[in-house]
Image: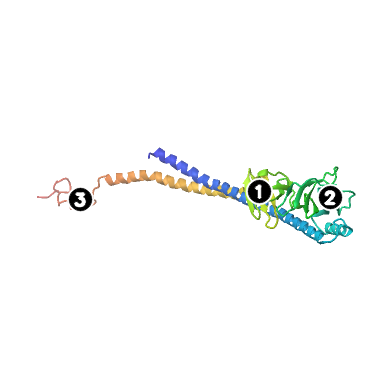
């Protein structure tokens, strides 16, 4: 390889030494940002799932208490128990008795029956789910109605989603498993995410820069979804780069200087070798050559003055 080739190779090595730590810093910052944001999404999904499980516990408890009470479902004793359950339950807005698709009596003390509409699906436990019910035609608020054993629990759709973050970057939802039917949601929800729900398991992934966690309940056929928008990843990566990128630049500069010094030393070796070879090839006259000449022959063979 000629001198020009060595110089090109040295320049490439210097550039690689400078760029490698910087690129490694960027890659690690991206990995750290992904890990941190998925961890945040996992916390939100866990909170939504916990609220949903508590809601399911309260619904089942209400149905058990009402079915265990003897007498007609709309008798005064049942209505009193419905009002007591309503007051004691933190997630149930009202409790009532269902005949067909009508709520014929409830803790709301409304006049006349309320048309709930047909259930959207029936869960594996036998509960009928109506995820979008309005108690009156003029009511702008919709509720989730869960019917179990002839009794219905009316749940405000936003209560399970009331997590400790109101950022627009966060999207949350609750699902029925294994159907993947969305029961409640807030924010952007890709339909494909609900298909990732697995009973009793938590899965996490990044989809189009959204950090998504889907947490399935081990006790109920429900799951929670939490997704953080791309700006969350970008913000976290920027924070990570503020600490990692300067270090990567410093390390890259140090490595580049070391490579440059070693390369210059390597380029100087051929010249040093040639100089050494020239010194070895040059004729040498021993310092004691004159001492080895015969007496009287030190000056080209001429005898010293006064010699015979």
Q: Nearer the viewer, residue 82 or 248?
A: 82
Q: Nearer the viewer, residue 284 or 3?
A: 3
Question: Mark 2 falls on what kind of element?
Answer: strand
Q: Nearer the viewer's eye, disc 3 or disc 2?
A: 2
Q: Which color scheme did the rendering employ for the protein?
A: rainbow
Q: Nearer the viewer's eye, disc 3 or disc 1?
A: 1
Image coordinates for residue 97, horizontal then vertical, percent: 83, 53
Q: Earlier in the sequence, mark 1 or mark 2?
A: 2
Relative horizontal placement of residue 238, taking residue 297 as reference (left or right): right
Q: Residue furthest left?
A: 308
Q: Earlier in the sequence, mark 3 or mark 2?
A: 2
Callout 2 environment at 10 Å: few (<14), some (14 to 19), or many (20+)? many
Q: Which residue is mark 2?
A: 103
- Marks 3 & 1, CB-CB < 8 Å contact: no
Q: Earlier in the sequence, mark 3 or mark 1?
A: 1
Q: Which residue is mark 1?
A: 212
Image coordinates for residue 78, horizontal then vertical, percent: 86, 58
Callout 3 environment at 10 Å: few (<14), some (14 to 19), or many (20+)? few
Question: Mark 3 falls on what kind of element?
Answer: helix
- Marks 3 & 2, CB-CB < 8 Å contact: no
Position of the N terminus by quadrant: top left
Image coordinates for residue 201, horizontal then vertical, percent: 64, 54
Q: Nearer the viewer, residue 37 or 154?
A: 154
Image coordinates for residue 94, horizontal then vertical, percent: 83, 53
**Mark pair 3, 1: CA separation:** 95 Å
**Mark pair 1, 2: CA separation:** 37 Å
Q: Is residue 171 visible?
A: no
Q: Which residue is mark 3?
A: 290
């Amino acid at each position: 390889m000629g001198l020009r080739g060595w110089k090109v190779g040295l320049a490439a090595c210097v550039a690689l030494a400078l760029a490698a730590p910087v690129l490694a810093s960027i890659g690690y910052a991206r990995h750290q940002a992904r890990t941190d944001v998925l961890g945040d999404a996992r916390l939100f999904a866990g909170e939504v799932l916990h609220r949903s499980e508590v809601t399911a516990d309260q619904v089942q408890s209400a149905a058990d208490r009402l079915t265990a009470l003897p007498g007609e479902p709309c008798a005064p004793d049942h209505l009193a128990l419905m009002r007591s359950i309503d007051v004691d339950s933190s997630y149930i807005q009202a409790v009532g008795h269902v005949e067909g698709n009508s709520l014929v009596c409830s803790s709301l003390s409304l006049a006349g029956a309320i048309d709930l509409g047909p259930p959207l699906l029936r869960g594996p436990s036998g509960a009928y789910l109506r995820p979008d019910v309005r108690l009156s035609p003029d009511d702008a608020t919709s509720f989730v109605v869960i019917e179990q054993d002839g009794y219905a629990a009316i749940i405000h759709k936003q209560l399970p989603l009331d997590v400790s973050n109101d950022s627009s970057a966060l999207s949350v939802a609750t699902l029925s498993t294994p159907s993947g039917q969305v029961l409640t949601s807030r924010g952007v929800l890709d339909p494909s995410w609900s298909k990732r729900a697995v009973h009793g398991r938590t899965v996490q992934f990044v989809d189009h820069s959204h950090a998504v966690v889907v947490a399935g309940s081990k006790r109920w056929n429900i799951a929670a979804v939490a997704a953080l928008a791309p700006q969350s990843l970008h913000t976290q990566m920027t924070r990570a780069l503020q600490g990692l990128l300067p270090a990567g630049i410093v390390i890259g500069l140090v490595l580049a200087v070391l490579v440059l010094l070693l390369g210059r030393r390597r380029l100087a070796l051929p010249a040093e070798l040639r100089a050494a070879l020239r010194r070895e090839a040059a004729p040498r006259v021993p310092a004691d050559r004159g001492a080895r000449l015969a007496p009287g022959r030190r000056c080209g063979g001429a005898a010293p003055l006064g010699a015979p």
